């Protein structure tokens, strides 16, 4: 199988990332899917997608230079990189900033913001080396523009940084045809909430969502696929909010 799209998706093995991977596989992308710990989820998704496209899963921590390099080295084995989805993220703690441990703040900024910067930098270098007008999609959050008071200000601050990454890098590389865009989901039903100690969060927040339900990963994935497609070739620097009206 060969494809003109080769895309790295960080955190691409479960939750929103897995939905993105499935959608991109349908659209004919060759995929490198990164993850941190959950081998079972990664191998199951790889086995599921193998009949549709070429897919490699890479266990590596994207907050480290070596972890980032491992992802892009795997991509180089498969061909010429055309896309990156900066999706790996976590909130890790729910509560006011005053109750948020230092280590949690550092880990959340590292994963949601620093890793996105490291991966975006590496992708742009790969695009430039190959002379490719590639695309970076940054998964932000509605929290970046609400601040999420009382819930996770630490995470909202990191995601606001991601929005600035989208805007600034888009302008920096636009002259080379490289696009940088964002998607800001509202509350989506994934394990991210249980991992922050609040498995009922999506159901609870649903009461405040104008469309009356929390989102699903499949509510996000088509927009990512569109952002990576030629149909979005004049879209750069902007972040699309997908939040059921919240
Ligand atoms: P999940 O918790 O379901 O999945 C997170 C993914 O990131 C997993 O694949 C996980 O790997 C991977 N990951 C975690 N830490 C690292 C690391 N250090 N290095 C590499 N990979 C890592 O999250 P969601 O699907 O909910 O979230 C995806 C994105 O969407 C995140 O950026 C999140 O902030 C954003 N988002 C989510 C919302 C929601 O309500 N769910 C709302 C708004 C934004 P492993 O499986 O191995 O642990």
Image: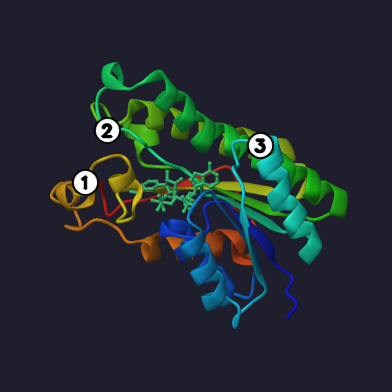
Secondary element at tag 3: helix
Query: Could you give the CA–CA distance between mark 3 and mark 2, rounded to whole angstroms?
Result: 26 Å
Q: Circle 1: is it few (<14), some (14-19), or many (20+) Cα within 10 Å?
A: some
User: Which residue, given by chain and number where applicable, does mark 2 sit on?
Assistant: 94
Residue 17 placement (x, y as % from top left): 48, 58
Name the one closer to the observer, 145 or 16. 16
Q: Which residue is drawn at 53% across and 58% down?
A: 12
Q: Quadrant of residue 55?
A: bottom right
Q: Is residue 138 left or right of residue 123?
A: left
Which circle's residue, 3 or 2, is located before the other in the chain?
2
Q: Is mark 1 within 8 Å of ligand 1?
A: yes
Residue 184 placement (x, y as % from top left): 42, 46
Q: Which residue is drawn at 56% across and 70% down?
A: 46
Residue 158 placement (x, y as % from top left): 46, 30
Which circle's residue, 2 or 1, is located before the other in the chain?
2
Q: Circle 3: is it few (<14), some (14-19), or many (20+) Cα within 10 Å?
A: some
Q: Residue 118 carries which label?
A: 3
Furthest residue in direction bottom, as rendered: 51
Query: Could you give the CA–CA distance between mark 2 and mark 1, rounded to whole angstroms?
Result: 10 Å
Furthest residue in direction left, as rendered: 207
Q: Quadrant of residue 116?
A: top right
Q: Can residue 79 be seen in this view?
A: no
Q: Can residue 96 be seen in this view?
A: yes
User: Which residue, given by chain and number where applicable, does mark 1 sit on?
Assistant: 201
Residue 228 placement (x, y as % from top left): 60, 60
Q: Is residue 186 left or right of residue 240?
A: left
Q: Does the residue labelled 3 lie within 8 Å of ligand 1?
A: no
């Amino acid at each position: 199988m060969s494809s003109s799209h080769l895309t790295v998706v960080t955190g691409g093995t479960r939750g929103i990332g897995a939905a993105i991977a499935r959608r991109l596989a349908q659209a004919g992308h060759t995929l490198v899917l990164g993850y941190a710990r959950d081998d079972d989820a990664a191998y199951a998704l790889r086995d599921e997608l193998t009949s549709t496209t070429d897919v490699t899963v890479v266990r590596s921590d994207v907050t480290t230079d070596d972890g980032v390099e491992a992802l892009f080295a795997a991509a180089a084995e498969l061909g010429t990189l055309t896309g990156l989805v900066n999706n790996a993220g976590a909130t890790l703690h729910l509560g006011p900033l005053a109750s948020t441990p230092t280590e949690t703040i550092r880990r959340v900024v590292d994963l949601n913001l620093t890793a996105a910067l490291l991966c975006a930098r590496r992708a742009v270098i790969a695009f430039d080396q190959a002379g490719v007008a590639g695309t970076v999609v940054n998964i932000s959050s509605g929290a970046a523009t609400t601040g999420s008071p009382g819930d996770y200000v630490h995470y909202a601050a990191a995601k606001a940084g991601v929005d600035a990454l989208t805007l600034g890098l888009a302008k920096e590389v636009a002259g080379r045809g490289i696009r940088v865009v964002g998607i800001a989901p509202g509350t989506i039903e994934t394990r991210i909430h249980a991992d922050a100690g609040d498995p009922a969060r999506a159901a609870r927040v649903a009461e405040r969502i104008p469309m009356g339900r929390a989102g699903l990963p499949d509510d996000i994935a088509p927009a990512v696929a569109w952002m990576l497609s030629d149909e979005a070739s004049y879209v750069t620097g902007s972040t699309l909010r997908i939040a059921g009206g919240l």
